[in-house]
Image: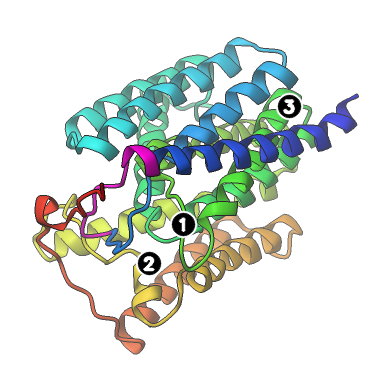
Amino acid sequence: MELSLLISIPLFAFICAKLSTYFTIQTAKKQHFYEENNARKIHSEKVSALGGIPIFITLCLSVLIFIKPSYLSYSIIGSSLLLLGVGLWDDLKNIGIKRRLLTQFAVANIAYIVGFQFIGSGIHPVIIYGLTVGFVMMMINGMNFLDGINGLAGGIGLIAAGIFAIIFYTKGQVELAFFALAYVGALLGFLWYNFGKKAAIFMGDNGSTILGFILAIFALKAWNLSMDLPNTTNLIMVSLTLIALPILDLFGVVTVRLSKRQSPFQADRMHIHHLLTDSGKSHPEASCFLIAWILSLAGIFYFELITSMSLATLIVIGSYLAIRVFYTTIKSPSISVVKWDKTAAQPSPTP
């Protein structure tokens, strides 16, 4: 029974997400639900940023049909619903950072309460709480930052969710494995319309924040499994590699902004994917380059070609910095901070 579900869950999710994403695109066109442009996402064409809706609907249906609901599934779905609502509000009305951070803080606390948290012997509970909440919020914002070119956030999420599904299934966490597989199918259905030089729909804050949240709790669970089971250092290294890009890019961009005495929330084109596209790569080329980088590192650590945690961390951080420096200096992209007038820049809907 379980083996058949390994195929039927992602297949159902893919079909459901593909159909619901298509209907979302058509509805957005009729109702003129388009993304508000900003300095990081400048599109001449009108494209909806409601991609999180069909992904969320697909997850809910998959859980109800294939997964025996538990407090764990309900907690993930409920937290995702909060992020979806606030993300939609922000995508359509631009509500500001304070409300978003408050919602993120709330869902990070929910994750902590239901058991998605760092564990370790001798660590004070207050430190565990702070690390957990801080990590979840960083992943939410990091993945939101990463959602700047076609296919990147969805592609990273697809690969990460797939590998987490394998980890959970082999370690006996069947419910989480099935949930991860449903997310794989949902993201694949979304990427059908998002990947390429021109996207028919964007994930938007309503999708990227949920993606960051789910990958954060998956990583926390994988971390807990590695603490409970012997000889699983490679499990930790693979898990950290899968979520490395949004965290590293978040720190990298904020560091650059602060060094220039700018607000860390100032929109610009200093993200690593923007450096790649500004150097001449297309959206698919930049996305595939970064996904291949993550996959190659994860493969090295999974097959234990490198077993030292400190060396693995050095390689991940060092390779990120090398890519960033190369495409900042040698390729010399044009980087600028843009003062953005949303009212003037937003395309008016056609009658």
User: Does the CB distance between marks 3 and 1 fall below 8 Å?
Assistant: no
Give the quarter of the image for residue 102. top left
Q: Earlier in the sequence, mark 2 or mark 3?
A: 3
Residue pointed to by mark 2: 272
Q: Earlier in the sequence, mark 3 or mark 1?
A: 3
Q: Earlier in the sequence, mark 1 or mark 2?
A: 1
Res. 84 mark: none
Residue drawn at x 75%, y 39% as measured from the top left: 11
* Distance CA(mark 3)–CA(mark 1): 25 Å
* Residue range highlighted in magenta: 29-40
User: Does the CB distance between marks 1 and 2 fall below 8 Å?
Assistant: yes
Task: Tell us which disc is closer to us: 2 or 3.
Answer: 2
The residue under label 2 is which amino acid type?
Ile
Give the quarter of the image for residue 85. top left
* Distance CA(mark 2)–CA(mark 3): 34 Å
Residue pointed to by mark 3: 173
- Along the viewing direction, whichever of 138 and 343 lies nearer the viewer: 343
Res. 245 mark: 1
Give the quarter of the image for residue 334. bottom left
Residue drawn at x 27%, y 62% as measured from the top left: 42
Residue 140 versus residue 251 in the image, above or below: above
Residue drawn at x 18%, y 31% as measured from the top left: 98
Q: Give x and y (percent) for residue 237.
A: 61, 51
* Distance CA(mark 1)–CA(mark 2): 9 Å
The residue under label 3 is which amino acid type?
Gln
Residue 73 versus residue 153 in the image, above or below: above
Confirm whether residue 212 shows in the render. no
Residue drawn at x 38%, y 40% as measured from the top left: 30
